[in-house]
Each structure stands twice: as structure tokens, then as C-alpha cells.
Amino acid sequence: MVSSSGVVTEAAVPARRTRKLRKWLTANKILLALLLLAALKCLLWSVAMPPWRAPDERKHFGYLEYLSREHSIPVYGEAFFYPEDAESASRTNFYGVLGYDSTSVDPQVREVNVAAIHPPFYYLSVLPAYMASSGETVETQLYAVRIFGAVFFLALIAVSYRFGIMLFPQAPYLQIGVPLLMIFHPQLGFISAGVINDAPLAFLFTYFLYQLVVFAQGDFSTRRAAFIGVLIGLGMLTKSSFLVAYPMGLMVIAVLFVWKKGQRIRLARAVGVALAVSVPIFSWFYIRNYIRLGVWQPNYTEERYHATGLWNLWFATNFRADLISSFVGNFSWLSVPLPDNVLYWFRRISELSVFGLVASIIIGFRKRSWQLIKPWLALLFTVVFVLFVFSAAYFELAFGGSQGRYLFPAIFPFWSLVLVGLVGWLPPSWRSRATALIVSVAAAFSVWALFYEFVGRVM
Amino acid sequence: MGKWRGLPSWSAMVLVAVVAMIWLATTSFPILDKSQIVSSAQLQPVSAGHELIQTIRAPKDTISRVDLILGNPYPGAEGDFQFQLVEVIGPETGGALRLGETLREVNLDTSSFDYTTRQSFEFESVNVIPGSTYAIRLTSNDSEDTAVRPRGWPVDNYNGGRVYIDGEATTSDLYLGIFHNAGAGEILEKMKPWRPFPLNRSFFIVVLFLTGAATFGWVLWVVAGGQVDGKGENPSEGEGAPPSTILPGASAAGKLPPAGPARP
């Protein structure tokens, strides 16, 4: 209330807040709907997944338990599984996943927890959910952490929506369509619902990419560079594969150095700031590894393809097919792959989208009003995705055990390119309806994959 | 007119939720009852004149699908690969196996796949006696002796049966998935054990699913060109349109922050 003297009374403050909130909710209806969908999807997958079925979930959960009990960051080789987790794995038929009849576990066997190779950011972030559910059964704690961890998937969707608004301001169907395709991506849903550090990695990298694009468009401010540095630091403190951000960022800087001759000092300063901020955030973890273990990043090898090199791996082994399978949907410790005809159609659709993308760019050159994506953006996104494919291949050659989820940091570029490729060559007036059709198919596929292929087939 | 402006979006929500509800209520889901997933070894190829039999113990009272992993190492292979589910009469003793009536039979065109892949043999649900032994019999009319190579594991991993090659018992097991068909009720039951309240309630899962479907209905309607809040322009026809037609919140968020002043 405003009195006659113009003084705002206390009663007026909540009313104003309510009005502001209502205004914000109205203005962000679509974002909220996307977040609701993402939350429901994550929750459904979390519930659908029996305990310990996300990749290496016991190991990641063991990391959390170590943090909570030892009050320190684990060192590789010095952290072990806890007996109650082994008992839970036995109780919940975990070994049935692997096809064994025997589910007995000897809790006395001390098995090294290899998740200790990972940096601690994700585990520290979800630690409150673990602590809040202390006193409950291990399974209840696991579900609590899974559900709390969905916040990273929601953040990924929110950033993707904002990113879409920035990149495609005149194409709302893309702004909404790309996050929808991410929500309906079966393997992304499965991974994001488990206790595993891939969802925060995907979120942080997408956010980094968003900031990098803002930077590339001319905002070379110290603040922007510092923020990018924070994101890189946190990303490196989540998973070492975030290292891709450095060559990615440097490539963009190199191009800007050539194009923006008058801005070179500002660019150099921004690079310095980003490095000065990012390195201290994560370097302590890797330096500690080096001092204690003699390596920056410990790892273990898991030879699968016996490939002699990159070419051999890609063209003469099953690596490519396995990578695609575990990118689209191969659940429960890679023991529940989606049927081959699904992968067949995924490949055909991807190929169609590549042709469509090229056609869309050519058409965009000739008819400006038809242009949906700027060629530099298509190039940038392609480079990002290809870099992660190379990174997965390198990991396979060096250590083994590479999976499609290693490409998830490039998930926004991937689905943006696919959707633009599928609708970008159509007349503008058809595109929104075509997108609606595509996301409908994706939604039906997602529901089918969850209930029919996952719940039906998971042991 | 004003009071009806939200009708299309509500209709989209209800329509998608109803479709989702009908799907959930009427679909039959294959449920895995038993599996042996170790498939790193290539077992004896199945070609004309040879047979490979895997005995299984029926895990439930019906079987409607069996999954195997089959490799087809050379392109252009032709012929029929035959899958049979057969009764086993009498006990398995000394490697001898006496087969009874063929319960179900599925033919697979060998040329339909040219690399190692999981094959689902689906058939009309057949009643079996839980705990009793049945046989999966694999034969082929392809004379090429490398035609179809089932994958499995040479060491006994599955205690419900074993592989017989041309009547000889081995210690191997095929990669195997044995399914029965069930309705949504059983799928929801499967999602209960070990989950804390309220995650272990079927009602909760159904509500999540239907809320998701209704939300998707609304978003889909917006993507297809519906109005966001009943006023303003069609948000999905924004290309080439003035900024006012961009979605709420879009212009502010989409606008790039101004670049700092250029320095020499």
C-alpha cells in the first residue's frame, strides 16, 4: 500500500513481490515447462533404474561415502568399497545384471574404488543429499543422491534454452526443440538420473560454450574472461576430459586474433585472466596426484578392440558402432542396448541431417530470409563435436572403455546441428510444424525406450 | 472470446495425456526373466546339417521372446536360420538329450544382418512349467559352414542349462534373454523394490508420467505455432518478423551484452 504521503507500507512489499514473481513466471513459461519436463524425465529414470545400474554407480557412490566418512578427497589406490554397498549390490541382484546366478558377496574382500581417479566437484555438490539422508538404508541414500543430482540436468536444459534464444532469436521452434531433443535423448536421461559425474560435465561445458560464443561475438571484458575461467576450473575439477575446453578456447582466440586486429591486447588480457582464474581452481587436485602417485591423472586400462591406431580403431573394429550404441541408448552397464533397427534409423536420420545442414547453409547464402544457422556457428559446433569424438577415440586407444556418454559435453551442439539439418532446408513456414513432428517422434521413442526397452529388460 | 483463448493449449495437454494413458493401459511389455549376457566368445557356427541346442529352465509360466546374439561374418550370406523352442522329455543324462514337441518356431533370413547383433525371436506367448527344462534349437539350411555364429561363453555361467553341439554336451552357454509379456501393472511392480516412499508407489509413477505427457502437450502446441499466453503473435512464425514476436523473455536474454570500448 502507498499512503497518501507516498510512503510504501509493509503490506505493499509482499504484494509487489507476488506481482514480480507472477510476471517472471509468465515471462518464463516455456523455460519452466521445459524444466518441469526435464525434472519429470529425470525422476522417472531415477525411479526406473534399480540400485547400482548406472555405469560405475557403486564406485561413484563409494566416493561420496569416502568424502562423508573420511572428510578428505580420496587418492587413487587408497579408497576402498564399503561392505554395506557390497551387501546392497548383492541384495538388489546387481550381479544378475552381469548374468550371474550367484549374488553372494564377501564383504571382507577389500576392493579398491577406482572412482578415486576423479576430481571432487560433482561429489562435493551432491554430498548434502547424502548427508541429509544419513541414517536411512544405503538404497534410500542412493535414490536421494540421484534425485538431488538431477539439478545438473535441469541446469543443462536451462542453459541450452538460453543458448538457443541467443543463437536462434527468430526461430522459437529451435529454442524449444533442441532442449526437448536433449530431454528425450534416452542415454542422456539414463546417465543424468544416475550417481555419476557426466551430467555436471555436460552442463558446465555447455555453459562454457555459451560464454565462449558471447565472448567471440565481441564481449572481451575481464569479467567475461574471469567467468569463463571459473567454468573451466570447475569443469576440470569435475572430469579431466574438460581439458578439451582449452584447445577449443584457444582456437576461437586464434581466429579472433586474426580478425580483430585492433583488439589483440584485450584478447591477450582475456586469455591471461581465464588462465589465471581457471588453473588455481583445479590444479591443486592434479598436482596432489602428481606428488602422491607420480601422474597427473591416474587411470586403468581396459583393452577391448586391440586397435593399432586411430584409423584401425575407427574403420576396422566395432568401436564406431559401440560408440553410437552407447550414445543413443545402451543401459545398465552396457548390457541393455537398444535394438539394431533403432541404431539403423538413428544413423539414417543423422546422415539426412548432415545433408540438410549443408543444403540449409547453401540456401541461406542465396536467400537470407531462409538462413537458420550462421556458417561459423555450424563450423564451431561441428568442431566441438568432432573434438569430443577424437577425445573418446584417444581415450579408447590409451586406456579403453570409451563410451558414447563421453560425447555428452557436446550434446547441445549435436542436437542443434541435427535439428537445423532436419528443418533448415524446409520453407520457413513449414519449420515449426516439422519440428513439432520431430519432437513428437523423439518423445514417443523416449517413452518406449524407458518402459519397453529399459524397465522391461533391466534385471 | 477472451475466456476461450487458453482452450487450444489445454486441449493439447489433455489430448497428449489421454494418449499416454491409453498407451500405458493397453501396451504389452516384454519383461526379462533370465539372462546370460556374457557374449565374448564365438560358439560353433550353425550351418546345414548341424544343430546347436541350448537348454534352459523356464523362469516363469510363459515365454514370449528369446534374445540371442548372432554373428554373420560374411556379406551376401543367404538362407534360413531357424529358431525353435522345444520341450525336453526325460532328464538330461550323460549328455543325451531327448527332445519333444516343438512349441514355437521362428525363421530368420540370414541375409537380414551382416554383423554381430542381438536378435529378438518374438512369438505368441507359450505356456510352460516354471522350473522345467526346455530347449532352444538352432538350425540353418545355409551350406556355408561359417554362416551364423551364435555368441556366448565357453565356461558354465548359467546354471539353468548348457549348449549341445550336434548332440554333444559342452560347458558353454549362449548369450540369452528369456522374456514373458505383461501389462503396465507388472512393469510398475518392477519399479517398486528398494525404492523409498513415495518412489515405490505405482500411483506416483503414473502421475509423473501423465504430468510429463500433459506438459509435453502444451510445449508441443507452442512449438507447432500456438500462442504462449493467448496474446501476441504466433511465436513460431518469428523468422523475419519484428522483435515483438519473439517469445517472452527471449529478447532480453538473447541480446548480447554490449562489448567494452575498443582499446588500441
Image (cartoon, coloured by chain):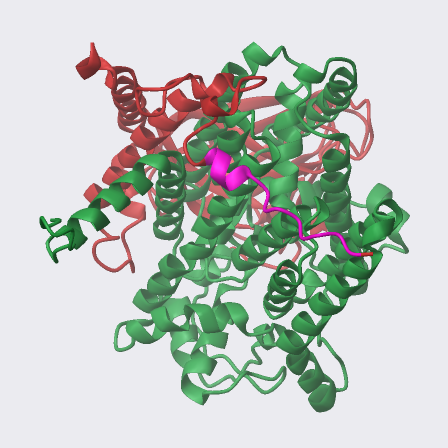
Can residue B257 be found in the magenta stretch? Answer: yes
Specify the colour of chain B: red
Q: Is residue A334 left or right of residue A364?
A: left
* Closer-to-camera residue (B37/A26): A26
Q: Which segment is the magenta one?
A: B250-263
Which residue does the image show at 45% across and 87% down from the upper left? Answer: A71
Q: In this rendering, is residue A391 above or below A110?
A: above
Q: Is residue B114 left or right of residue A74?
A: right
**Residue furthest to the front:** A5
Q: Is residue A117 visible?
A: yes
Q: Is residue A397 left or right of residue B258?
A: right
Which residue does the image show at 71% across and 68% down from the upper left? Answer: A273
User: Percent x, y for residue B246?
Assistant: 48, 26
Q: Main secondary structure of the magenta part?
A: loop
* Closer-to-camera residue (A167/B71): A167
> In green, which chain?
A
* Closer-to-camera residue (B174/B197): B197
* Closer-to-camera residue (B48/A156): A156
Number of on-image labels: 0
User: Percent x, y for residue A409?
Assistant: 63, 51
User: Percent x, y for residue B62?
Assistant: 35, 35
User: Percent x, y for residue A39?
Assistant: 37, 46
